[in-house]
Amino acid sequence: MSQLLYEGKAKKMFTTDDPDVLRVEYKNDATAFNGKKKAVFPGKGKLNNAICTKIFHVLKENNLPTHFIEKISETEQLVKAVDIVPIEVVVRNIVAGSLAKRLGLDEGTDLGQTIVEFYYKSDELGDPMINDDHALATKIATEEELAEIRRQALSVNEVLQALFAEAGILLVDFKLEFGKLKSNGGIVLADEISPDTCRLWDKETHEKLDKDVFRRNIADLPETYEKLLSRLEAVK
Ligand code: 5GP
């Protein structure tokens, strides 16, 4: 028996017969600005499932632990059950988005060093930025967990920068979520990595290949995600 466990903006999670395994279904919904902008794009779920599956396979080949088990249909994956650590981890290589706004920097400026930011995962509060001290004092995570999350986030960045570089794409920034495995408490990468959660620019033209095309009304979302998928599929 499969029960709906949780429905988010872009995915639904279902139980399976195995308590350590969940089924994820990618939806066709796109949202931006904390749900204030919404649309449905037929085919989006299928594209994000394919892109995310490719990325999780590459992370696995590079010995990075994730919740991903396997893709089971065009829009579905099986994943390991975790308790999500309520921190959104943003990794930035190039200035864009909220960083450009907050510090008055030009979008596209190379940062020269990677920035890792933590945000407290709360739709109600609009995901406020926090530092390590906030996370420790409020017991959102322990010092060891924060160190492990930061280490894994930086490793994911290295592997994905290399993957996207092979496709002629710059990994500008992205958001990760981590979970503690229900089975043994180990920290693994969870949620998704897709053009919904990354900024990806063509290396030469800086054409946007991510959800900013929807956020900023720049281009058709499914056409953009299709372009990204075919460029990733061309990488061995
Ligand atoms: P920014 O802080 O500039 O808005 O976002 C930085 C990066 O993290 C972008 O790649 C963006 O897609 C991702 N990101 C940050 N917060 C969220 C979120 O709540 N949902 C999703 N899907 N991505 C996010």
Image (cartoon, grey):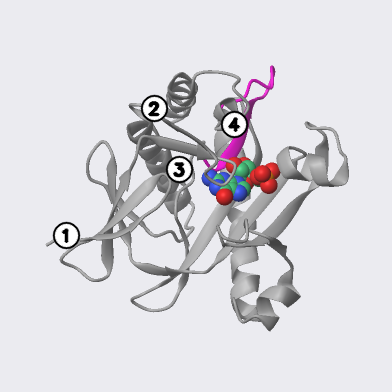
Q: The residue under label 4 is which amino acid type?
A: Arg
Residue at the image position 43 percent from the left and 78 percent from the top: 185
Q: Is there a contact, CB below 8 Å, between mark 3 and mark 1?
A: no
Q: Is residue 236 left or right of residue 117?
A: left
Q: In terms of sequence position, does the residue under pointer 2 or pointer 1 come before the other?
A: 1
N-term mark: 3 or 1: 1
Q: Earlier in the sequence, mark 2 or mark 3?
A: 2
Which residue extends farthest right?
104
Residue identifier under label 4:
215
> What kind of residue is marked 2?
Phe
Q: Main secondary structure of the magenta part?
A: loop
Please report whichever mark, 4 or 3, sits nearer to the chain's N-terminal start: 3
Earlier-in-chain disc, 4 versus 2: 2
Considering the image in quadrants, where does the N terminus appear? bottom left
Q: What segment is highlighted magenta in the picture?
A: 196-209
Residue 184 part of the magenta-drawn span: no
Vertical order, 209 against 194 (above or below): above
- Residue 138 x/y as whole percent: 65, 80
